[in-house]
Amino acid sequence: MLDPSVVEPTPWANGAGSTRELAAATDADGSTTWRISVADLDRNAAFSLFPGLDRVFVALGALRLTIDGVTSTLVAGDQAAFPGEAVVSVAVDGPTTALNVMTRRGRCRAEIVLRWPDDPRPEGVDATVLLADGHADIRLTFMPPAKDPR
């Protein structure tokens, strides 16, 4: 069980917020294969760019997420998926948090299912994040490496 409350926040790369990295894995070359984190969102902010990664963002409170100029209002539990190269910003009316899972495009992908704490954990879950009102179960699917065309 990954518990954000026991992880110290670190500033975002762009300085506009903070995150609590809960778990991560890298490829042999040091690039991120997957990463699970919880962001502390206390003001309007632009997201950092993460080329080559895909993101699944789960709002844990009300917020407005703008992805490449299109704004969506999200409430707790709503998910948004977008590429790490997208221009993304968040607007909040008060402090909230969000779960973020990033995966290396073409190498790995993530699925997130929210559940109540008393509900049984489904089979095949790779990680569970403890949230204020429940759990987030994360399933990672790995793709076979591309074959050399030679």
Image (tube, helix red, strand yellow):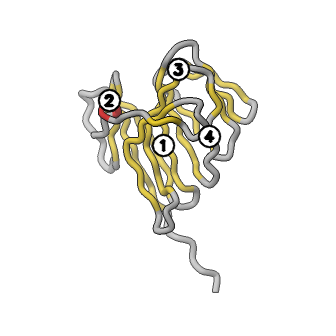
Q: What is the spatial separation of the Cα atoms under label 1 and label 3, in whole angstroms?
A: 20 Å
Q: Where is residue 101? Give x, y as percent.
A: 48, 43
Q: Where is residue 35? Give x, y as percent.
A: 45, 48
Sequence-wise, the earlier of marks 4 and 1 is 4
**Numbered disc 2: secondary structure:** helix
Q: What is the spatial separation of the Cα atoms under label 2 and label 4, in whole angstroms?
A: 23 Å
- The amino acid pointed to by label 4 is Ser
Disc 3 target residue: 42
Disc 4 target residue: 48
- The amino acid pointed to by label 3 is Asp
In the drawing, what numbered circle is on residue 5? 2
Q: What is the spatial separation of the Cα atoms under label 3 and label 2, in whole angstroms?
A: 16 Å
Which of pointers 1 and 3 indicates the residue nearer the eye? 3
Disc 1 target residue: 101
Q: Up-down: is 114 above or below 63? A: below
Q: Up-down: is 9 above or below 26? A: above
- The amino acid pointed to by label 1 is Val
Which of pointers 4 and 1 indicates the residue nearer the eye? 4
In which quadrant is the N terminus drawn?
A: top left
Nearest to the observer: residue 26 or residue 80? 26
